[in-house]
Image (spheres, helix red, strand yellow):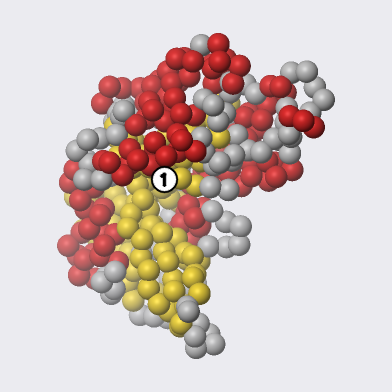
C-alpha cells in the first residue's frame, strides 16, 4: 500500500480592476504551472505549512481564508515505490511586500481565472480554482477568521496545591501546545485576543500575543466560575466579535464552549450548499467541547447583524 505524504498550499487571490486574479507558480524542474504547496514538516500544523510554503515558493506573505478542496494523487518515491500525496488547500490573501523566490520556482504569475484555467498543467488543480471562483461569485471569498480555542492541558486539579483554581497553570504538554498554536493563529492573521482570566487560558494565547505584540483582553464571564454564575453572558463575547468583524481568537473552558458554538451555529449562512455540514461540525465541536489545545476556525463574511459563518475547520493538537 502507498504511504501517505501530507502537504499543504494556497491559492493566492486578489481583485484588480474589479476582476478576480489568482497566483500560479512555474517550476522549471517539472516545467509545470501549479499552486504553491509543499510537504508538512514533522510536528507542523497544516495551516502553518500552507503559509510557509507560499512564502518560500512565491515570496508572498499569505493570510489564510476559506478551506478549499483537497487534492490526492500518487507520486513515485526515490526508491521507485508509489506514495499517496494529500494536499490541503486554502484561499489566501496577500499581506506585505513580496520577497525572493525559492530556488525551485522561477516565475509567479497573477492571472485572471480563465487564463489560469488554461495555464494549469494538472486537471486536479482546477478543483481549487473552481471553488475560489464560485466563492467569489457568491460573496464568500473575502472572509475574516473567528477562532475558538480550548485552553491547552493544565496541571491536574488533583496535583494542584493552590486554593484559587483560576491560577492553575499549564503543564509541560500544555506549554508545548501553546507554543505550537502561535504560528497557527498567525497563519490566519488574528489581531484580537479575548480570553477567560484563568491562567491556563491566558497562557494558551500568550506565546502568540508576545510574537504578534497583541494585548489579551480577559473577560470574567468566559471563566468556568463566571459562566456558572451568569451563563448567558459568555456567548455575548462571540456576538461582540462578530459585530467588530476583526480577525479574532477567543479562549475558554470546556463547559463554556457549547454556548459559544451555539452562538456561531446560528450565524451559519443558510444559502451555503453545505450549510448542514458546517452546522454539524459546530454541533459536534460543542458536543466534544473541543480537545484541550484545539483551535476551531470559523470563516466569517461581513460584520454586525450581517456577519455570517460560511466555513469552519478544526485543528487538533
| Residue for badge 1 | 313
Q: Determine whether 135 is above or below 289 in the image.
A: below
Residue at point 34%, 76% (across, down) = 32
Residue at left 49%, top 29%?
A: 257
Vertical relation: 222 (above or below) 246:
above
Position of residue 22 in the picture relative to residue 99 (left or right): left
Q: Nearer the viewer, residue 96 or 52?
A: 52
Q: Residues within 10 Å of mark 1 (few under 14, many from 20)?
A: some
Q: Residue furthest top?
A: 229
Residue 215 appears in view: no
Q: Specify whether 182 is left or right of 261.
A: right
Q: Position of residue 285 (x, y in %)?
A: 45, 38
Residue 39 image offset from top left, x and y in percent? 50, 66
Outermost residue to the bottom: 80
**Residue drawn at (48%, 19%), measured in percent from left and top?**
234
Residue 311: image location, x then y, percent: 33, 42
Above-or-below relation of 121 to 268? below
Name the residue nearer the viewer: 26 or 286: 286
Image check: 63 left or right of 308?
Answer: right
Rendered image quadrant of residue 228: top right
Amino acid at each position: 500500500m502507498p504511504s501517505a505524504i501530507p502537504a499543504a498550499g494556497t491559492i493566492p487571490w486578489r481583485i484588480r480592476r474589479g476582476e478576480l486574479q489568482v497566483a500560479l507558480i512555474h517550476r522549471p524542474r517539472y516545467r509545470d504551472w501549479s499552486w504553491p504547496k509543499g510537504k508538512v514538516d514533522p510536528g507542523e500544523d497544516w495551516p502553518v505549512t500552507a503559509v510557509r510554503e507560499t512564502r518560500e515558493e512565491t515570496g508572498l506573505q499569505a493570510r489564510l481564508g476559506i478551506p478549499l478542496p483537497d487534492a490526492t494523487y500518487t507520486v513515485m518515491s526515490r526508491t521507485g515505490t508509489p506514495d499517496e500525496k494529500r494536499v490541503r488547500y486554502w484561499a489566501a490573501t496577500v499581506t506585505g511586500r513580496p520577497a525572493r523566490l525559492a530556488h525551485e520556482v522561477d516565475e509567479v504569475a497573477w492571472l485572471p481565472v480563465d487564463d489560469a484555467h488554461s495555464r494549469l498543467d494538472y486537471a486536479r488543480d482546477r478543483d481549487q480554482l473552481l471553488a475560489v471562483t464560485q466563492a467569489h461569485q457568491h460573496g464568500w471569498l473575502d472572509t475574516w477568521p473567528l477562532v475558538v480555542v480550548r485552553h491547552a492541558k493544565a496541571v491536574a486539579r488533583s496535583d494542584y496545591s493552590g486554593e484559587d483554581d483560576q491560577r492553575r497553570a499549564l503543564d509541560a504538554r500544555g506549554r508545548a501546545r501553546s507554543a505550537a498554536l502561535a504560528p497557527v493563529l498567525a497563519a490566519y492573521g488574528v489581531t484580537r485576543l479575548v480570553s477567560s482570566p484563568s491562567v491556563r487560558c491566558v497562557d494558551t494565547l500568550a506565546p502568540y500575543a508576545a510574537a504578534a505584540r497583541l494585548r489579551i483582553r480577559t473577560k470574567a464571564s468566559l471563566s468556568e466560575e463566571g459562566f456558572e454564575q451568569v451563563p448567558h453572558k459568555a456567548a455575548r463575547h462571540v456576538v461582540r466579535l462578530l459585530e467588530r468583524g476583526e480577525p479574532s481568537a477567543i479562549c475558554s473552558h470546556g463547559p463554556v464552549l457549547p454556548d459559544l458554538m451555539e452562538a456561531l451555529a446560528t450565524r451559519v449562512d443558510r444559502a451555503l450548499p453545505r450549510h448542514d455540514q458546517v452546522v454539524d461540525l459546530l454541533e459536534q465541536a460543542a458536543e466534544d467541547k473541543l480537545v484541550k489545545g484545539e483551535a476551531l476556525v470559523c470563516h466569517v463574511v461581513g460584520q454586525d447583524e450581517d456577519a455570517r459563518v460560511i466555513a469552519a475547520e478544526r485543528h487538533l493538537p
